[in-house]
């Protein structure tokens, strides 16, 4: 099973096709080479170090809120 998670782009290096994304306060470098265009502030689906697609920010926020609820309910 594969899992892709929403992450917000906080900086870009377009020449290197790389970005830094924010994952609930954790910053991670990721490749943007699979995307035609992306900008700071976009939400992307992130899987094994690659941004797979730009996603709707409302949907990303809803998904992140569900993740936060699950963390809060965990023992």
Image (spheres, rainbow, N blue to C red):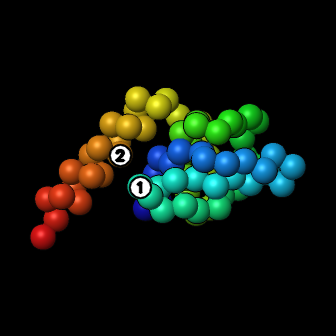
The x, y position of residue 13, in whole percent, is: 78, 50
Q: 42 above or below 1?
A: above
- The answer to whether 3 appears left or right of 74 in the picture is right
Q: 74 above or below 60?
A: below
**Could you tell me which residue is drawn at 74 percent across and 54 percent down?**
18
Q: Nearer the viewer, residue 3 or 44?
A: 44
Other residues around mark 1 within 10 Å, as few (<14) / some (14–19) / many (≥20): few
**Could you tell me which residue is drawn at 64 percent across and 39 percent down?**
40
Q: How many marks?
A: 2
List the residue tagged with mark 1. Answer: 24
**Could you tell me which residue is drawn at 58 percent across and 37 percent down?**
41
Which mark is first along the chain, 2 or 1? Answer: 1
The x, y position of residue 12, in whole percent, is: 72, 47
Q: Nearer the viewer, residue 33 or 16?
A: 16
Eye-nearest disc, 1 or 2 = 1
**Could you tell me which residue is drawn at 83 percent across and 54 percent down?**
16
The x, y position of residue 37, in whole percent, is: 74, 34
List the residue tagged with mark 2. Answer: 64
Q: 73 above or below 35?
A: below
Query: Which quadrant of the figure contains the C terminus?
Result: bottom left
* Residue 67 visible somewhere in the drawing: yes
Label placed on residue 60: none
Q: Could you give the CA–CA distance between mark 1 and mark 2, rounded to whole angstroms?
A: 8 Å
Query: Which quadrant of the figure contains the N terminus?
Result: bottom left
Q: Secondary structure at mark 1?
A: loop
Q: Secondary structure at mark 2?
A: helix
Residue at the right extreme, as displayed: 15
Q: Are the two marked residues, 1 and 2, in contact with CB atoms closer than 8 angstroms?
A: yes
Other residues around mark 2 within 10 Å, as few (<14) / some (14–19) / many (≥20): some
- The answer to whether 15 appears left or right of 26 in the picture is right
The x, y position of residue 48, in whole percent, is: 58, 63
* Residue 4 visible somewhere in the drawing: no
């Amino acid at each position: 099973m594969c899992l892709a998670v929403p992450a917000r782009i906080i900086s870009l290096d377009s020449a290197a096709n790389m970005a830094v994304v924010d994952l609930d306060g954790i910053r991670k470098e990721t490749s943007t080479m699979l995307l035609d265009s992306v900008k700071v502030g976009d939400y992307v689906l992130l899987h094994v170090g690659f941004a797979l697609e730009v996603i709707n920010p409302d949907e990303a926020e809803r998904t992140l809120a569900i993740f936060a609820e699950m963390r809060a309910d965990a023992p």
